[in-house]
Amino acid sequence: MPPTHDPTPAPKYAWQSSFALLIALAALALPSAPAHSEDAAAGAASGLPFPRFVSLKADKVNLRAGPTRDHDVTWVFTRAGLPVEITAESENWRRIRDSEGTEGWVYHSLLSSRRTALVAPWSKKDESFALHQSGDGNARVTAQLQPGVLGSVKSCDKKWCRIFGEGFDGYIEQERLWGVYPDEAVE
């Protein structure tokens, strides 16, 4: 079998081979640029798990079609404290979903880690839900809350949550709230 010819010219100086090897090793050691997609990797930006609930910090929050200010505004939230669920992250942007299923991207500084919840936003407006003095279905009822009432979450034990707001403070069954997960303990 005749010898094969390698078309790659041999380096003229020995340091050229070493330099090429160093460049190749450095390229392998550098982190890859993150892919920019609407399905960002879990915890990529903040390191926090998602999905997770947070609340809106401002009375006016623009919801955008993508994770930059160049993307169109698709919705404007006008209620500070509204609970939203973070479903993805991309650098300083968070993809969120509200209780009605509306999704889009908001800038991270417009969100707060303060936990809030809506009382049964999926229910009919003529229903009401008992707020109890303690986390017990037999405890005294202190108020009846309508669907969509917004409250701050003080604690949850996976069955009952203590919530409070203007004119109320008490315990409601955790499954009646949007803003906490059914099996989540909140302290």
Image (tube, helix red, strand yellow):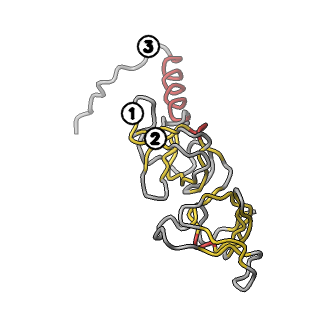
81 vs 153: above or below: above
Q: Which residue is mark 1?
A: 71
Q: Amino acid at mark 2?
A: Val
Q: Amino acid at mark 1?
A: His
Which mark is nearer the camera, 2 or 1? 2
Identify the element where label 1 is drawn.
Answer: loop
**Residue found at the far bottom of this picture:** 138
Residue found 74% across the figure and 65% down from its top: 169
Residue found 38% across the figure and 41% down from its top: 74
- The answer to which of marks 2 and 1 sits earlier in the sequence is 1
Residue 133 quadrant: bottom right
Identify the element where label 3 is drawn.
Answer: loop
Q: Is residue 71 left or right of residue 18?
A: left
Identify the element where label 2 is drawn.
Answer: strand
Q: Which residue is mark 3?
A: 12
**Residue found at the far left of this picture:** 1
- The answer to which of marks 1 and 3 sits earlier in the sequence is 3
Which mark is nearer the camera, 1 or 3? 1
70 vs 109: above or below: above
Compare residues 49 and 167 and report the one nearer the observer. 167
Q: Quadrant of the C terminus?
A: bottom right
